[in-house]
Image (cartoon, helix red, strand yellow):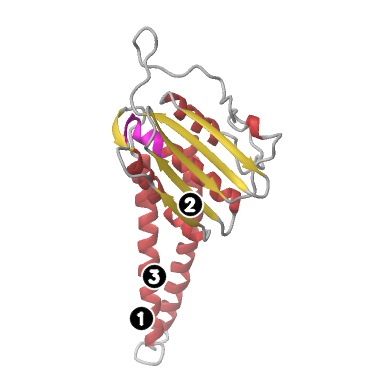
Amino acid sequence: MASLGKISAMVAHELNNPMSGILSYSKYCEKIVKEGLIHGDPTGDLSECLEMISREAERCGNIVNNLLVFSKKSYGEFTQAKVNQIVERSLRVIDHSLKVHEIVLEKQFAEGEDLIWCDPSGLEQMFIALIINAIEAMGKGGKIRIQTDCSRDPDITIQISDTGKGIPAEVLPRIFEPFFSSKDSTVSAGLGLSVVYGIVQSHSGNITVKSKVGEGTTFTILLPRTPVEKPNGESGLRQEIYPKNI
């Protein structure tokens, strides 16, 4: 829910730009019509404005539809799903944000069997949260690289790297703690990465991070292909408080 709130705030901010454009161009069209200049020189301007309004309105619709698709997912329901497809769906939700921030996205999806037993909606939320963090770390420009590796058993590996400002060494051990944030408290409540960690643990997986100030950050996630069994035969979590090999 914390991640969804963060995504909603980001989408609301993004909607503000096209809506402002729609308002400006519609007022200009109204002025042309009121001045009776439809058959005069401004006709080309009117046509251009209407095309712009249509294009911006369609963009708003796409942003909202992607958010609605994401928000209607059912969390906590485990099934078999393909990792690469989950990542692709996650990227569609925030595709516009990547373009607005002029960020280059590099995808390196491994060939081979990427089917795992998972909560697809939970993983989608996790990927979105990590990518949003990467976007915030870079501001304008930069590159995000997403890699998947299906060559290992019993885990599938996903790496998300950015060329952002990096995380200071003294902060790194605490980034998965609830309510801890190195950002301004008015911008972040510090819940994003703790939610990510919880989702990884619910899959009996592991997440580690490597970062260097001024060079960027890489998150590496290992997810088991099949449920991990407890000694009593029940599927359960790996009993760790926080990742030990950050």
Percent across and percent down for residue 59 are 38, 61
Question: Which tag, 1 or 2, sits closer to the chain's start?
Answer: 2
Q: Which residue is mark 1?
A: 47
**Are the residues flagged by discs 2 and 3 in contact, CB closer than 8 Å?**
no
Tell me how far mark 1 sits from mark 2, CA to CA: 28 Å
- Residues at marks 1 and 2 touching, judged by CB atoms closer than 8 Å: no
Quick one: 73 or 99, which is closer to the camera?
99
Tell me where the magenta segment starts and ends, as one range. 115-124
Q: Residue furthest left?
A: 80
* Residue 122: quadrant of the picture: top left
**Image position of 4 with respect to 46: above or below:** above
Which structural element holds mark 3?
Answer: helix
Q: Residue furthest top?
A: 232
Q: Which residue is mark 2?
A: 12
The image shows residue 228 at horizontal and vertical percentages of 38, 19
Query: Which of the 4 quarters of the picture holds residue 187?
Result: top right
